Amino acid sequence: MQALWMLLASLFFATMGVCIKFAAAHFNSFEIVFYRGLVGMAFLVGMTRMQGVSLRTSLPMMHVWRSIVGTISLTAWFFAIAALPLATAMTLNYMSSVWIATFLLGGALLMQGRNAPIRQQGPLFLTVLAGFAGVAMMLRPTLADHQVMGALVGLLSGIFAAFAYLQVAALSRAGEPESRTVFYFSVGAVLAGALGMLFVGVSPLHWPSALWLLPIGLLALFGQLCMTRAYSRGATMVVANLQYSGIVIAGIYGMVIFGDQLSLIGWLGMGLIIVSGITATVLRTRAVPNAPAEDH
């Protein structure tokens, strides 16, 4: 049953990506982040009241940092979805596990220094190399000139997603309930989206194009709730690895709905990223056991 919850979460997130691609024709990334956060705030206020969870926190600065890095990741991801084939954007964002492995490797070498030979970090090192080799295979032969910026921003979304995940894990260890953490992230998304809109402008809410904004927020929330239930009730390793099914679903959506094309070497690169991400998840779980779900 936990596997089904994770597959359902992946379906919600991939479907959200489809809605974002349609909405991006009418709204900029800051607007989409703003409305996604607004829908999340409204839903979570009601949910936390029903659960009896207080929204007061004794760790405001930890939530501020989580909101900053999470919002940067979310904005970059939405931009990448608009600029790249859906599966490519999803894969670059899901590289967060590979980036976390990179941080773990660097941290281990810095903390242990000469007392820990590099061969002890061999599996982690190979995971990082495999992930970056997958990126090179997937992007260089499949990107048009006008997609280079989208690819760079997509890589940025994965890096900041890794920062956000590490902060969510820290908040979880400090005793913060996930609903409170996600609420303050939604608040940060609303503020950051509103600030960005001051500089890049606000698009008029014309119907029916404005209707895309509601399912973006709802699908993100439903995906997060399903993912949280899967992590809380299932085997962490199984659930974390099933998360990568979202890339496959996005690939199917991209080919069927948008006519996206990916070369054979591109598909091989995507597969290499998925394998390295799964391996990085194994290593991450050893370093951070019982970690919470990643946000999208």
Image: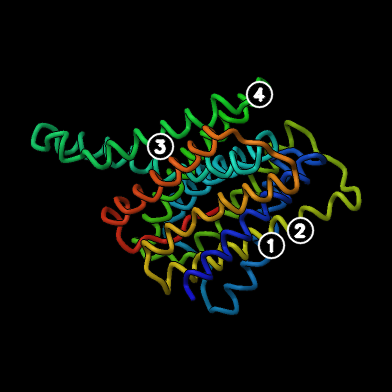
Name the residue beneath numbered marker 3. Answer: 131
> Would residue 260 be found to the left or right of residue 1 on screen?
right
Q: In 3D space, how far apart are the residues under numbered discs 2 and 4 (Cα atoms)?
A: 31 Å
Q: In terms of image quadrants, where is residue 153?
A: top right
Q: Residue furthest top?
A: 145
Q: Tell me the amino acid under the disc marked 1.
A: Leu
Please tell me which residue is depicted at 42% across the width and 74% down the height of the picture: 233
Q: Residue at x 76, y 53 (%)?
A: 213
Mark 2 or mark 3, earlier in chain: 3
Q: For mark 4, what is the residue?
A: 144
The CA span between labels 1 and 4 is 32 Å
The residue to which callout 1 is attached is 218
Q: Secondary structure at mark 4?
A: loop
Q: Earlier in the sequence, mark 1 or mark 4?
A: 4
What is the CA distance from the residue labelled 3 to the residue labelled 1? 31 Å
Mark toward the start of the polypeptide (3 vs 1): 3
| Residue of label 2 | 214
Q: Secondary structure at mark 1?
A: helix
| Dot 2 crowding, Cα within 10 Å, few <14, some 14–19, many 20+ | some
- Name which residue type carries label 3: Gly
Q: CA distance from mark 2 to mark 3?
A: 34 Å
- Contact, CB < 8 Å: mark 1 with mark 2? yes
Q: Earlier in the sequence, mark 4 or mark 3?
A: 3
Tell me, yes or no, whether the two marked residues, 2 and 3, touch with CB atoms within 8 Å.
no
Label ID, residue 8: none
